[in-house]
Amino acid sequence: MKRLVHGTRTAYTNYQCRCAACVQANRVYLRQWMRADRKRAKGTEPPTHGTVRAYQHFCCRCALCRQANTDYYRQYRRGLPGKVLLFGSAVKTPGGANQPGV
């Protein structure tokens, strides 16, 4: 069996270690990953507001995207992930803003 090395993301994810050094290593990794993910998303089509994808991958925090993410995770926690449209369709409202499709 391998020895647990503290201060690594492996210890945090694979061994569920939550000491300060492992938590910090995981934070550093996630920050770097999010920065790289945002760079990959630049130059692509702008997100459709009111979708979980816009909230998670494009870091949009408008009211529509926040509500879509909240609704998704509420249903996910209830054990109904198959009944949720993760990337949902969008329809235009009279005001021009995108709303999640029904």
Image (spheres, rainbow, N blue to C red):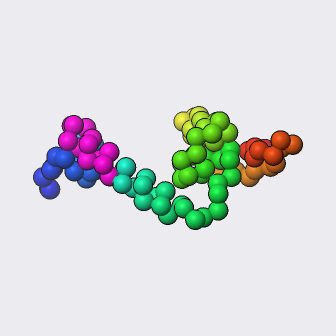
- In the figure, is residue 18 to the left or right of 6? right
User: Which quadrant holds the C terminus?
Assistant: top right
Q: Position of residue 19 (x, y in %)?
A: 21, 37
Residue drawn at (32%, 52%) of the image: 29
Asked whether the viewer can see residue 90, the reply is: yes
- Relative placement, left or right, of 97 versus 34 is right
Q: Position of residue 45 (x, y in %)?
A: 64, 62
Residue at 67%, 39% in the rendered image: 64
Q: 29 or 19: which is nearer to us?
A: 29
Q: Image point 64% across, 57% down: which residue?
A: 46
27 drawn magenta: yes
| Position of the N terminus by quadrant | bottom left
Q: Nearer the viewer, residue 31 or 15?
A: 31
Instruction: Count how many numbered circles sit on residues in the image.
Output: 0
Looking at the picture, how far across and down is residue 62, in whole percent?
Answer: 63, 39
Residue 82 in sight here: no
Locate residue 73, reporting x and y percent. Answer: 57, 38
Q: Residue at x 23, y 43 (%)?
A: 22
Q: Is residue 38 magenta?
A: no
Q: Which residues are magenta?
A: 18-30
